[in-house]
Image: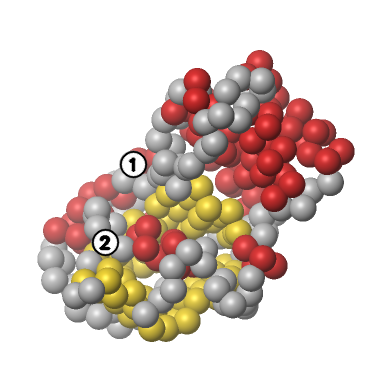
């Protein structure tokens, strides 16, 4: 399948620290990819480079064949980035923030209103449309950022800790929407420490430690053919058994 997200020997250095070290991966259209690793492994740095927010020290990155830094607004419009703590404008209402985001991406005003009504109904935000964001709980903030993101239908989703602050209903809703978008051809690239929640969601997993990819593949491949071993156990076995990983021999294909 065509690669929607591609990294070729990407390295990012901050001072004396190699946050990402020779990372090579390919994620296809229609794929949900779990990007896992301990705190400080380089996951968020990788996502920020893919979104064009950081420049790699070495190597190349591509979104749909285009460099996210050089491609400008055309590439960034194809991307959605949902961080674990998204920035929202507290003095706007939920409806105003939705309109602001829509205009930012060039959506016609009449389409914004129709999309907002549908998205707010879907994410149970209709009654909060005129409430200032400063009065939102963390869960409501998460639902608002998802509502604005899914309404514009990007081709690539980067999601950092997608389930923090969500109740069980919200978690099921987001998992269902991510599956739906992947079936429609979008690439989903997510990170989380709550491994039990993604076992039934991801198609493949890559495990990062100290900036290097130490394992990659389907869950079955990482389990070595065992269907009983939990992803959490696989992750701990690999990361605790590789305190100083050597450069990987294979890329994620």
Instruction: Report the front residue among 7 and 137.
Output: 137
Residue at horizontal 12%, vertical 66%?
243
Residue at horizontal 62%, vertical 27%?
93
Q: Position of residue 146 (x, y in %)?
A: 58, 39
Q: Is residue 3 visible to us here? A: no
Direction from residue 115 to residue 123 in the image, left or right: left
Direction from residue 42 to residue 53 in the image, left or right: right
Residue 245: quarter of image: bottom left
Direction from residue 84 to residue 89 in the image, left or right: right
Residue at horizontal 53%, vertical 53%?
81
Q: How does the figure colour the protein chain or chains? A: secondary structure
Residue at horizontal 50%, vertical 25%?
134
Instruction: Report the front residue among 167 and 12.
Output: 12
Q: Can you identify the residue that label 1 sits on?
A: 194
Q: Position of residue 251 (x, y in %)?
A: 39, 78
Establish if 96 lies above or below 57: above
Q: Can you identify the residue that label 2 sits on?
A: 41
Q: Residue furthest front?
A: 91
């Amino acid at each position: 399948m065509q690669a929607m997200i591609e990294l070729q020997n990407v390295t990012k250095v901050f001072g004396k620290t190699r946050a990402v070290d020779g990372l090579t991966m390919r994620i296809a259209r229609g794929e949900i990819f779990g990007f896992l690793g301990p705190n400080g492994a380089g996951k968020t740095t990788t996502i920020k480079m893919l979104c064009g927010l950081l420049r790699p020290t070495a190597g190349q990155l591509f979104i749909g064949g285009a460099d996210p830094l050089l491609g400008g607004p055309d590439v960034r419009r194809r991307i959605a980035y949902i961080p674990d703590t998204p920035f929202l404008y507290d003095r706007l209402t939920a409806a105003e923030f939705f309109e602001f985001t829509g205009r930012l991406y060039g959506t016609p005003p009449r389409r914004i209103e129709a999309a907002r009504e549908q998205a707010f109904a879907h994410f149970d935000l209709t009654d909060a449309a005129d409430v200032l964001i400063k009065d939102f709980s963390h869960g409501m903030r998460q639902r608002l950022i998802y509502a604005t993101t899914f309404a514009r239908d990007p081709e690539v989703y980067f999601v950092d800790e997608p389930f923090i602050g969500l109740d069980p209903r919200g978690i099921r809703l987001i998992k269902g929407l991510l599956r739906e978008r992947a079936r429609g051809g979008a690439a989903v690239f997510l990170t989380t420490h709550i491994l039990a929640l993604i076992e039934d969601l991801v198609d493949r997993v890559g495990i990062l430690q100290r900036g290097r990819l130490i394992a990659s593949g389907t869950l079955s491949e990482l389990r070595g053919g065992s269907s009983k071993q939990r992803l959490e156990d696989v992750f701990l076995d690999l990361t605790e058994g590789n305190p100083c990983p050597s450069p990987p021999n294979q890329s994620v294909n």
